[in-house]
Amino acid sequence: DSGVTQTPKHLITATGQRVTLRCSPRSGDLSVYWYQQSLDQGLQFLIQYYNGEERAKGNILERFSAQQFPDLHSELNLSSLELGDSALYFCASSVGPGENSPLHFGNGTRLTVT
Amino acid sequence: GNSVTQMEGPVTLSEEAFLTINCTYTATGYPSLFWYVQYPGEGLQLLLKATKADDKGSNKGFEATYRKETTSFHLEKGSVQVSDSAVYFCALSDRMNYGGSQGNLIFGKGTKLSVKP
């Protein structure tokens, strides 16, 4: 058990809808990362937060947004969903913002858009 | 931009066989290199890492050496077990535009390993 909790485990929704994925980092970790895993693109980095502030942005679509709250949990909001957004979304956390802090991954949220 | 290329799978081996999974990278500067493993239904777990050239990372019988001259970080294990069946990801640490380190990783596409008894 990595200590990173993601909810829900599965989500099925229709095109055009909006969903929110939630992540609770490991106790003591200040940095949260969101990744999207799909068969064709592999694991793509979306966005990173450190102690409530956005730190790095990857291939995140404008329809997607995220935030990290004062209690350090994070939410990833996906709107105007398309079929191509179906994927496994992982949250990871680490103690610090830099590369010397190993990432600990949650078990992911599987999103299916129909 | 920075990228990681790893051998495509799936790789199927018999128990006790020797394992090599190739990984090469393209990066500016000197990133840290990682191998992560993903067991079915789970998130990724750090297997090993190396932070500078010629470093050897090792864990649970797996090892990989950071080769700057060949920009490679191949994963090896001398004798695989059925419990090693998983997807293995090679990754490197990304760098901010101004050269500072950051925590997010760039992953290869993963190599699925199946070990038969």
Image (tube, coloured by chain):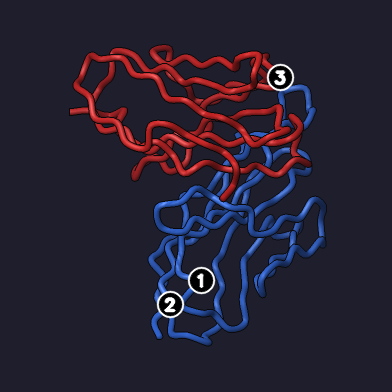
Chain colours: A red, B blue
Q: Is B38 above or below relative to A94?
A: below
Q: Which residue is mark 3?
A: A51
Spatial separation of the CA atoms under disc 3 and disc 2? 41 Å
- Amino acid marked by disc 1: Asp
- Amino acid marked by disc 3: Asn
N-terminal of the pair, mark 2 or mark 1, is 1
Spatial separation of the CA atoms under disc 3 and disc 1? 36 Å
Specify the subunit that label 2 lies on: B
Proximity of marks 2 and 1: CB atoms separated by less than 8 Å = yes
Q: Position of residue A1 (x, y in %)?
A: 56, 50
Q: Residue at x 69, y 66 (%)?
A: B64
Q: Which residue is mark 2?
A: B115
Residue B98's quadrant in the figure? top right
- Amino acid marked by disc 2: Val
Q: Which residue is mark 1?
A: B84
Q: Is B65 above or below relative to A35?
A: below
- Under tag 3, what secondary structure? loop
Specify the subunit that label 1 lies on: B
Quarter of the C terminus of chain A within the rendering? top left
